[in-house]
């Protein structure tokens, strides 16, 4: 992929003819891409001050970037946000030549930022609609695949959104060809292709509303009912829902009129017709959260895709639904909800492109759902919702101060609450109907309900992260603490596929928007950029070398199957910054900030573009680490003294796995990652111990050049003790701190 994309409009008339369709399809592309975009990018606070005079309007746009513009009259305008942007991508309904020629040739520099994928996708769609009346320099599919760039991702997205339409190949054009072909070609007689949207195919005339109880027909009744409950649980649950619906105080997140984001390619189970249907805008539906487990269950595949979209498709084609899904369909029927979202049948399981697009937007699936059914009482998809033989107690709609404690105790017994994906399904849902071995519960933003009564939830009652909608009304000044608590809760969960770690948390990151506690913010490998240097010093309770999670950088908690710890020293520094309105980062090279100049002992410069965006450029030194621990920590770890090369004094103690330490050399690499400056003198406060990387670094350096994080060590080292013969070589008794530039992954 080049650093710039260029395109030429060859026919104004044809451009104007397809313009409404291109605008509509661009909205679909933006939704499917799931990339943060804005129409007016401001880089950082330094730009706000230097270019905008620190104006309130510029600060507002930085903290809450305006959305991209996709409008028939105004045009299509978008850019990446903060450091993920470059030049804006602009298309207009009545384009004018940008240069002193008549040619409608335009360009957009993207510098390989994420929004380049969207640029490539929109240009590809324009080529499909305009054919010979448009030139965008599209590579061949094999060229795009070889380069592994924005074009490859764009081609995959377009093929999934509009599978009937081929991606035209463009012959390479010389400059002379470009000039000749860029002229008006109004006489072109090629017909515009007839193109159907995948969202509308086969859905004409369908009523996608919520029918009344008893208006479901008997399509699925005989197969799915009764549920494994004694008593009448659905009337109890319906009573809980109605109780939440008619109360306003404290139920703001339950009744929030947030605009429902329409998701391209979203599918739903129509429990009345017994088949899968494409979702329409503003459809009311229920979502299901459950544990797949084993044995494997049936699902939506390319081989049964057409059959399951037919009326009564599940039963007509002998699809055996798992007990949890069939119970959920029956519950929707009883409660009067027509549509149900279930991952097994609403995501095409054997199509990797479909899975990527659907998983990217899963957080909207749960936040848009009117209610989420939680099957927390089993370990697999055939567990069902009910507990055989368990009697439902008579409904008691009265205040009961023990409901929350009963709920958290019931949840602690479940496998469901230990799984990675279910975390954001829980916290991003507006309301939960949760089935456990201790009976059903209903949880909304204001109350917890059980068959024994309800309890009003206050902010000091139980864990805030157990409450639905907790990310929708976050108060400034508490948001960072909420995020760090989220990281700790989530890191303790299990994932079947380790590479899903970031995706299964992505919805929570998006919930914070582009600011934390009123400060402009984004997330780099899970670390908030506005407090990046401080949170870069996260720790773990125990050094476990085998806990490394492949595919993620070692300097982020995403790279470890351990729960990160944020000591009080970190939070003290964060609170000092918040109190004094300080911002910026030494490590993030593009955001220097206003609180700290770079000192001689700082390591900095995240490579946020280029061949590998997960690398950190650093300057460190080898230090001697004693081979035998001076103090045991638990059964496997110990404290080892670290010595300064300049004077042999002890720099501090580092906690390491004892057997791992015995296999390492006496001298180990360290780098400063946090420094303080007082009276013009710098002190190193935190050192990071490193080892040679064992990861596939995608062609960036070799094992001798690349390192990974091992552990952190608190210290208090004077600058003169760290750099005493800079840029010189000393072959005497004292080693020299050389400060090489290498990579840490």
Image (tube, grey):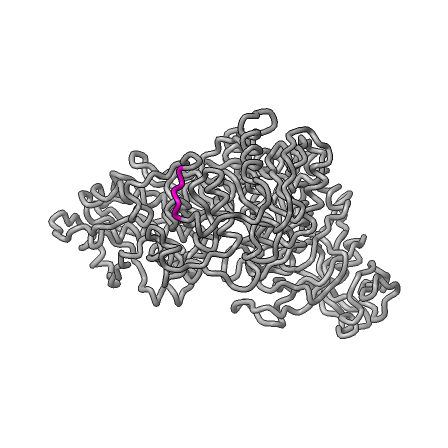
Q: Read off the magenta span.
A: 215-219
Q: In this view, does 608 lie to the left or right of 466?
A: left
Residue 523 can be seen, yes or no: no
Q: Residue at x 51, y 46 (%)?
A: 363
Q: Residue 143 colored magenta?
A: no
Q: Is residue 700 left or right of residue 583?
A: left
Q: Nearer the viewer, residue 395 or 560?
A: 395
Q: Nearer the viewer, residue 656 or 316?
A: 316
Split into 4 quadrants, where in the image is the N terminus? Answer: bottom left
Residue 140 placement (x, y as % from top left): 31, 64
Tally of marks: 0
Residue 693 can be seen, yes or no: yes
Main SS of the magenta segment?
loop
Residue 631 placement (x, y as % from top left): 88, 63
Residue 307 placement (x, y as % from top left): 34, 57
Residue lying at the far right in this picture: please name it: 630
Q: Which residue is drawn at 40% across and 53% down?
A: 117
Split into 4 quadrants, where in the image is the C terminus? Answer: bottom right
Residue 300 placement (x, y as % from top left): 42, 58
């Amino acid at each position: 992929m080049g650093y710039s994309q260029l395109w030429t409009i060859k026919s104004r008339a044809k451009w104007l003819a397809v313009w409404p369709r291109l605008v509509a399809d661009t909205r679909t592309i933006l939704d499917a891409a799931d990339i943060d975009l804005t129409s007016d990018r401001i880089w950082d606070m330094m730009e706000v001050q230097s270019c905008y005079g620190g104006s309130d309007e510029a600060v507002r746009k930085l903290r809450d970037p305006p959305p991209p513009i996709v409008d028939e009259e105004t045009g299509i305008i978008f850019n990446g946000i903060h450091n993920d942007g470059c030049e804006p991508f602009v298309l207009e309904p009545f384009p004018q030549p940008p240069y002193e020629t008549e040619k409608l040739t335009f360009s957009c520099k993207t510098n390989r930022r994420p929004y380049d994928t969207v640029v490539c996708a929109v240009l590809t769609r324009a080529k499909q609609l305009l054919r010979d009346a448009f030139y965008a320099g599209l590579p061949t599919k094999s060229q795009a695949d070889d380069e592994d760039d924005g074009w490859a991702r764009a081609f995959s997205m377009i093929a999934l959104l509009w599978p009937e339409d081929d991606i035209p190949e463009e012959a390479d054009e010389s400059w002379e060809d470009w000039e000749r072909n860029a002229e008006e070609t109004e006489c072109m007689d090629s017909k515009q292709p007839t193109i159907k949207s995948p969202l509308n195919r086969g859905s004409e005339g369908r009523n996608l509303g919520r029918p009344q109880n008893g208006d479901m027909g008997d399509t699925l009744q005989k197969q799915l009912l009764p549920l494994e409950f004694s008593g009448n649980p659905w009337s109890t649950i319906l009573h809980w829902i109605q109780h939440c619906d008619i109360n306003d105080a404290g139920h703001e997140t339950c009744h929030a009129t947030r605009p429902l984001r329409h998701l391209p390619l979203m599918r739903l189970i129509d429990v009345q017709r017994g088949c899968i249907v494409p979702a329409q805008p503003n459809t009311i539906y229920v979502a299901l959260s459950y544990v797949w487990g084993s044995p494997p269950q049936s699902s939506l595949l390319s081989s049964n895709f057409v059959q399951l979209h037919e009326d009564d498709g599940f039963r007509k084609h002998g699809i055996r639904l798992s007990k949890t899904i069939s119970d959920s369909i029956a519950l929707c029927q009883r409660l009067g909800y027509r549509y149900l979202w279930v991952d097994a049948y609403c995501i095409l399981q054997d199509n990797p492109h479909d899975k990527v697009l659907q998983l990217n937007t899963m957080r909207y699936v749960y936040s848009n759902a009117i209610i989420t059914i939680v099957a927390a009482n089993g370990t697999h998809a055939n567990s069902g919702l009910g507990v055989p033989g368990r009697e439902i107690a008579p409904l008691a709609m009265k205040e009961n101060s023990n409901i929350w404690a009963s709920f958290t105790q019931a949840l602690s017994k479940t496998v469901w609450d230990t799984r990675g994906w279910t975390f954001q399904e829980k916290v991003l849902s507006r309301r939960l109907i949760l089935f456990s071995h201790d009976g059903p519960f209903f949880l909304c933003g204001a109350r917890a309900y059980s068959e024994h009564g309800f309890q009003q939830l206050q902010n000091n009652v139980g864990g805030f992260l157990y409450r639905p909608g907790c990310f929708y009304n976050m108060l400034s000044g508490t948001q960072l603490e909420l995020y760090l608590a989220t990281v700790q809760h989530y890191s303790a969960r299990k994932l079947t596929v380790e590479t899903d770690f970031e995706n299964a948390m992505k919805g929570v990151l998006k919930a914070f928007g582009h600011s934390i506690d009123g400060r402009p913010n984004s997330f780099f490998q899970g670390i908030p950029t506005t407090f990046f240097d401080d949170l870069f010093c996260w720790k773990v309770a125990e050094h476990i070398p085998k806990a490394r999670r492949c595919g993620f950088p070692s300097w982020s908690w995403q790279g470890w199957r351990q729960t990160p710890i944020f000591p009080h020293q970190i939070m003290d520094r964060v609170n000092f910054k918040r109190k004094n309105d300080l911002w910026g980062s030494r490590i993030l090279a593009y955001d220097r900030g206003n609180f700290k100049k770079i000192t001689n002992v700082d390591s900095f410069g995240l490579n946020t573009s280029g061949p590998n965006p997960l690398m950190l450029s650093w300057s460190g030194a080898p230090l001697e680490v004693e081979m035998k621990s001076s103090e045991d920590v638990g059964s496997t770890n110990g404290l080892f003294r670290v010595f300064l090369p300049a004077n042999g004094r002890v720099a501090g103690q580092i906690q390491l796995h004892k057997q791992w330490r015995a296999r390492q050399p006496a001298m180990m690499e360290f780098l400063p990652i946090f420094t303080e400056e007082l009276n013009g003198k710098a002190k190193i406060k935190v050192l990071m111990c490193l080892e040679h990387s064992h990861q596939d670094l995608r062609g960036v350096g070799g094992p001798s050049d690349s390192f990974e994080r091992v552990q952190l060590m608190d210290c208090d080292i004077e600058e003169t003790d760290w750099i005493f013969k800079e840029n010189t070589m000393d072959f005497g008794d004292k080693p020299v701190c050389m400060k090489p530039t290498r990579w840490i992954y």
